[in-house]
Image (tube, rainbow, N blue to C red):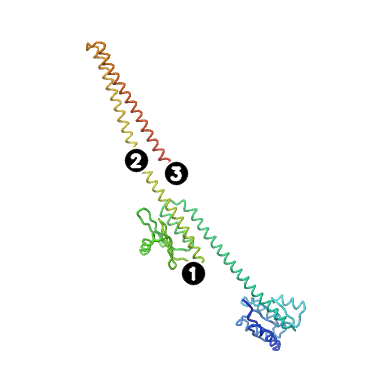
Amino acid sequence: MALQRILAVDDEPFNLEIIEEILEDLDFEVQTATSGHECLEVVGDFDPQVILLDVSMPQMSGYEVCKAIKADPNLQHIIVMFVSARGSVEERMEGYSVGAEDYIVKPFGHSELKAKLLHLGQMLLEKDILEQQVEDATTTAFSAMATSSEMGQIVNFVEQVGAIQDVSELADALISCLANFGLSCNIEMRVDADRLHFASTGMCSPIVIELFEILHSKGRLHEFTSRILVNYELLSVLILNMPSEDPDKHGRIRDHICFIVSVTEQQLMSILTKNQLISQQSELNGAIKTIHSKFTGLLSMLNNNRSQNEAIFKRLQELFESRIPTMGLDEDQEVFIFRHIDEAIQSSVAREEAISQVKEAFSEIENDLCLLTNKDAAQH
């Protein structure tokens, strides 16, 4: 802010007239006081940026006035320039020790006073710039700290959410994460044909559930008043109390919410996929048990048939061996009969080998299915 208001304090009215005359063409607002006490009475209301303060005044010296001004937190920002007929080093040191910013010795010329005031005006401008820079830096620092804290919450959520394997537990973790940002929310999770609802307050109201129904397929982001609705394929989140009074924070929190909901959506998909694989694995295990039962029954039947065939051929062979010698057949006839019996036995043996190959094939199929099931279980 440029220099605009000056308070001149001197117990000699003539000196005040000179000062006013010098400053009249500089477009300053000038007020005067004829004593230290009067200065302290008017300084608060007038709020000058610079005080031209005479040192030698009765009852209360300029030094005492300056001390009082610099001791008051509401006034200590005012620049004090002593005006004195004495300009020794000691006098100047005394002025600086009580907090004055400048010193001019009477009598002074017009140009000297103007130059000093212009210099003080430049000090005011630089002071305002510095204060603004400090304010901006402080704001940036606090914003950075806030962002750092917010990012810490997000990192913690991402680290923890990967271990969650239950839909309700995932919803609770999301509600807790958003609560760390001071946010109240409602959640809808679309799991298979079901719509599961969760809320910071315990239950979603009917109108919120209807809102989810209407808007979940109408775009990713909806903002209205202090509320924001974020939609993903399986998940919708309605925030009820966005910080609308702070645009910067509002934008930052909105971005955080979109990221957090996206991470939650991915974990929800992971949970549902894993549950589906577990279900499929259970069905596959059941199918393997059924196949095993069928294979076992079939192999048992084949084994029984083999035993029965062996018994039949053995009895038939014994019967022919005991009866053929008594049937009066010539040698060619006996050879013919025994040859056909041998061929039938050999054919039965060949069938037994085929049955063994079938049994081995059944065992290989069963082992392959078991290995596949165990591999899926290990991966998921």
Mark 2 vs mark 3: which is more N-terminal? 2
Whether tag 1 and tag 2 are in contact, CB under 8 A, the answer is: no
Amino acid type at circle 3 is Gln
Residue 329, disc: none
Task: Decide if residue 349 is on the left or right side of residue 80.
Answer: left
Which of the pair 96/26 is nearer the observer? 26
Mark 1 vs mark 2: which is more N-terminal? 1
Which of the pair 107/180 is nearer the observer? 107
Residue under the image location 76 percent in, 80 percent down: 87
Crowd tier of the residue under label 3, counting other residues whose Cα lies within 10 Å: few below 14, some 14–19, many 20 or above: few
The quadrant in which residue 374 appears is top left
Amino acid type at circle 1 is Glu
Residue 287, disc: 2
Q: CA distance from mark 1 to mark 2?
A: 61 Å
Q: Where's residue 362, x and y in %?
A: 36, 33
Furthest-left residue in view?
327
Q: Secondary structure at mark 2?
A: helix
Q: Which residue is mark 3?
A: 379
Residue under the image location 37 percent in, 32 percent down: 361
Amino acid type at circle 2 is Ala
Q: Where's residue 345, x and y in %?
A: 30, 21
Q: Where's residue 175, x and y in %?
A: 44, 59
Reply above or below: 207 against 294: below
**The N terminus appears in which quarter of the rendering?**
bottom right
Reply above or below: 314 against 299: above
Residue 245, disc: 1
Task: Decide if residue 158 is on the left or right side of residue 313.
Answer: right
